Amino acid sequence: MSQSFRHPEILEIARRDGKVTVEGLAQHFGVTLQTIRRDLTELADAGRLERVHGGAVLPSGTINIGYEERRHLNNVGKASIARECAARIPDGISLFLNIGTSTEAVAQELLHHKDLMVVTNNMNVANILVANPDCEVLVTGGTLRRTDGGLIGTLATDSIRQFKFDLAVIGCSALDAEGDILDFDIQEVGVSRAILRHSRKTYLVADHSKFKRSAPARIASLAEVDLFVTDEPLSPALARSCESWNTGVVVARVERAEAG
């Protein structure tokens, strides 16, 4: 396999697992350790990965990865999380869904729910829920972020303040070891904080890759959400913290394809 074909797959493995190792990649591709080291050096020079001892990790920083890349990142895990979340959303409530590919997956699982009023600042969520005739869809105002269909800024925040939602389902860009919920866009953070203040209950949906990333702006703590739905068990320390905060944790069962 040529280098041009290896690089995208190396990045996909890094996004899925948070880290790649020289030995693991050499075995995966059937090439030498020296070849993989050269690949990782080139990807690091291009800013796509950061070299660490024995391999590489996704780069930390202040810019989110592209929306299309996020859409395809851990699709299986996000779908499993969405099913678990949607199963805990009753019919006949007011619901807020915010920006993100995980909340879009939840919207897809709500197509057979009845008597919902869904408010969103995510144009993609609105377009998904058009297919459910038993769902009233309200879209906030705001500045359109063309990269992902999100509505952000003062108008979005002011719209949210007109409501008191029964439930909000939010996503995030990253989670740290202390349970802080993080994002890249400070305007989006302001919107997310308003959502938390104007919801009776809040669910966070985030797959395990969010623990392997960093973002500069803090939204809130897991202590401020009622339920966290993810696809891999938390660290023992964070699991204990969630228990002390009375934050419920659901680990979705993910059926992953066997590597062949």
Image (cartoon, rainbow, N blue to C red):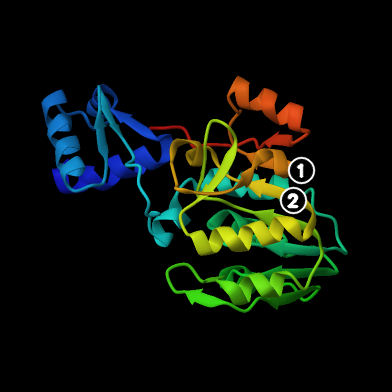
Amino acid tagged 2:
Thr
Amino acid tagged 1:
Asp
Q: Which residue is mark 2?
A: 202
Q: Residue at x 35, y 38 (%)?
A: 14
Q: Nearer the viewer, residue 258 or 54?
A: 54
Q: Nearer the viewer, residue 232 or 83?
A: 232
Work out whether residue 180 can be spotted.
Answer: yes
Among the 4 quarters of the image, the one containing residue 116: bottom right
Q: Nearer the viewer, residue 53 or 76?
A: 53
| Secondary structure type for disc 2 | strand
Give the total number of marks visible in the rendering.
2
Could you tell me residue 102's position as x and y percent? 58, 53
| Secondary structure type for disc 1 | loop
Q: Nearer the viewer, residue 256 or 106?
A: 106
Question: In the visual, does 190 lie left or right of 214?
Answer: right
Question: In the visual, does 8 lie left or right of 77?
Answer: left
Distance from disc 2 to disc 1, alpha carbons, whole Å, reads 5 Å
Sequence-wise, the earlier of marks 2 and 1 is 2
Q: Residue at x 52, y 36 (%)?
A: 176
Q: Where 98 sits versus 241, above or below?
A: below
Whether tag 2 and tag 1 are in contact, CB under 8 A, the answer is yes
For mark 2, does the 10 Å Cα neighbourhood hold few (<14), some (14 to 19), or many (20 or more) residues?
many
Question: In the visual, does 124 lie left or right of 117?
Answer: left
Give the position of the C terminus as an image quadrant.
Answer: top left
Q: Where 191 sits versus 58, above or below?
A: below
Could you tell me residue 56's position as x and y percent? 28, 32
Q: Residue at x 18, y 48 (%)?
A: 46
Q: Where 157 sits versus 25, above or below?
A: below
Q: Which disc number belongs to residue 226? A: 1
Give the position of the N terminus as an image quadrant.
Answer: top left
Could you tell me residue 66's position as x and y percent? 38, 59
Among the 4 quarters of the image, the one containing residue 167: bottom right
